[in-house]
Amino acid sequence: MRKKKSIINSSVNIFSLLLTFLPNLIVRKAFLNSLGSEELGLISLYTNIIGWISIIEMGIGSAIVYSLYKPFYDKDYTKVNAYINYYKHFYRIVGFTILLSSFVISPYMKFFISGDIDSNFVSIGFLLFTFNTFISYIFSHRLCILNVAQESYKLTLTTSLSRLIIAVFQYLSLKLNPNFYFYIIIQILVNYIYYIIIDKYVYFKYKYIFDLHGELEKSEKYNLTKNIRSLFMHKIGSLIMFSTDNIIISKFLGLSLLARYTNYQTIISVIQNFFNALMGGATASIGNLISEGDKKNIYNIFKNMMFLNFWFASFIVISLYNTIDQFVVIWLGKESTIDFITIILILFNTYFVCMRQSVETFKSASGLFYQDRYAPICEALINLFMSLYLVNKLGLLGVFLGTLCSNLLVVFWVKPYVVYKHLFERNVLEYYIMYFKYMLVGIIPLFITNLLTSTFKYNYNIGSFIINCFINIVFINLIYIIIFHRSHEFKYFRGILLNIIKKIRG
């Protein structure tokens, strides 16, 4: 049942991303053509500023989801209700605090932008954008039960449907009456209706939980507070790490260059979301597995996940290396591109982030938030200071060189150590041997596909792009099948795939 739910969650996650991928690309192109690159850069800037304001959430959502695994597994629904009520109370405070903070910050938004742009225009857009975030905090507390019950696919699918509706209305508005404010208002209205509907569905499905009245004990509040403090450190680190690059680019290099970079970021984010959907669909099942306490079985599952992690991470990065520039030119034109060395650095960072997904999944599912609480801060500060130093010397390249250095110097070493020591109780050297063995294997399809696609990837037409993609899909996977076909991990996933095929035929 656990394996089945993981497959369902991952499959629905991937389907949902496919559902919204093309509409989002079409809307982005329509936005660029109708409103211009500066307004497009503003959307990215708003997202990052909201991320910083949302730091007051402190990671309580992740802490409570982790805390819910055991009582839900034990069918202690009164305790589940107690955690969800705590979640509701805290998140509503967070939502109103974020809304008030946006009113304080909005007059000073121009500080983050290089170039001339109307400050009132920027401020009003920011307030509207913040209100959309506020809605999510008001309705989030009940939805977490779907993740704990291993039914996150329901949330994923309905969220994707709402995003598809948003994309359709936004595209129509951009074509009929282009207006930056109306573009954001559409998102607010559709999201509000969506959250009301999904909230009612979850309430009636789990009414037997929500109608109870539970209270947390002092020891439970202490453990929860301890995890929240640790997750707060992780959240700060993550924000500095992933939400400062766009702000630095906007401040020092301008909104137009930010828009050009986010063209690539949009594609990479979508591909990463596919990857996270595949890996993340198993998170609740892993939390359930860890609750059983079989260390040997947990570690064997981790090795299988690590293998799958490498296969998809390397496939993503190698394919993007061969296709992303060609795709951006076909999609938006040569004027929307950035230099190739910067692209390579961005892809290096993408690989390191993707390759730590399996470690992150097991770490989160096991509640190991406290042991490495300072590592993300160290990583983030290295990223921030090096990016600020190098942006004036190397421009856009310097921003991502700082990110690469921070990726390599801290979390790359610390997170695996914590998981191996406290969860697996094994020597972390096993992880690094596995990691670098996979990395060396990945060089083989990188080299071969680079040669095979060299005559196609510099032709900016759809036919050459399709051939380029076909070569990557076939040869990367074929090479890995040849190399790994006798490995235990390959046989494990082949067995799962064959079982699925048999059930479909049946």
Image (cartoon, rainbow, N blue to C red):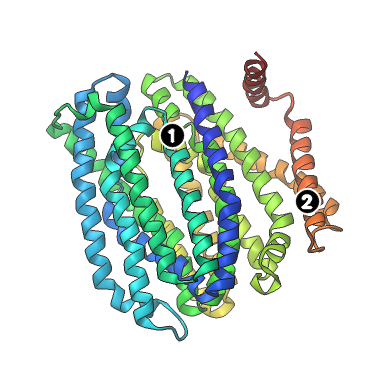
x and y percent of residue 220 in the render?
Answer: 19, 33
Q: Which amino acid lies under the numbered mark 1 shown in the image of this protein?
A: Lys
Please tell me whether residue 3 is drawn above or below residue 312 in the rendered image: above
x and y percent of residue 127 in the render?
Answer: 31, 68
Query: 148 or 435: which is nearer to us?
Result: 148
Q: Which quadrant would residue 492 be assigned to in this image?
A: top right
Label 1: which secondary element: helix
The earlier-in-sequence mark between 2 and 1 is 1
Please tell me whether residue 339 is drawn above or below residue 237 in the rendered image: below
Please tell me whether residue 411 is drawn above or below residue 488 in the rendered image: below
Circle 1 Cα neighbour tier, 10 Å, few/some/many (<14 / 14–19 / ≥20): some
Residue name at image x 71 percent, y 50 percent: 319
- Can I make out residue 65 in this image? no
Asked whether, in this view, residue 220 is left or right of residue 19, the answer is left
Residue name at image x 53 percent, y 47 percent: 273
> Which residue is at the far top?
506
Asked whether, in this view, residue 7 is left or right of residue 459, the answer is left
x and y percent of residue 388 in the render?
Answer: 47, 73
x and y percent of residue 167 in the render?
Answer: 51, 55
Query: 448 or 30: which is nearer to us?
Result: 30
Cα–Cα gap, marks 2 and 1: 33 Å
Q: How many marks?
A: 2
What residue is shown with label 2?
466
Please tell me whether residue 150 is drawn above or below residue 227 in the rendered image: above
Query: 219 or 185: which is nearer to us?
Result: 185
> Which residue is at the far bottom?
116
What residue is shown with label 1?
154
- Can I make out residue 38 in this image? yes
Circle 2 Cα neighbour tier, 10 Å, few/some/many (<14 / 14–19 / ≥20): some
Q: Which amino acid lies under the numbered mark 2 shown in the image of this protein?
A: Ile
Label 2: which secondary element: helix
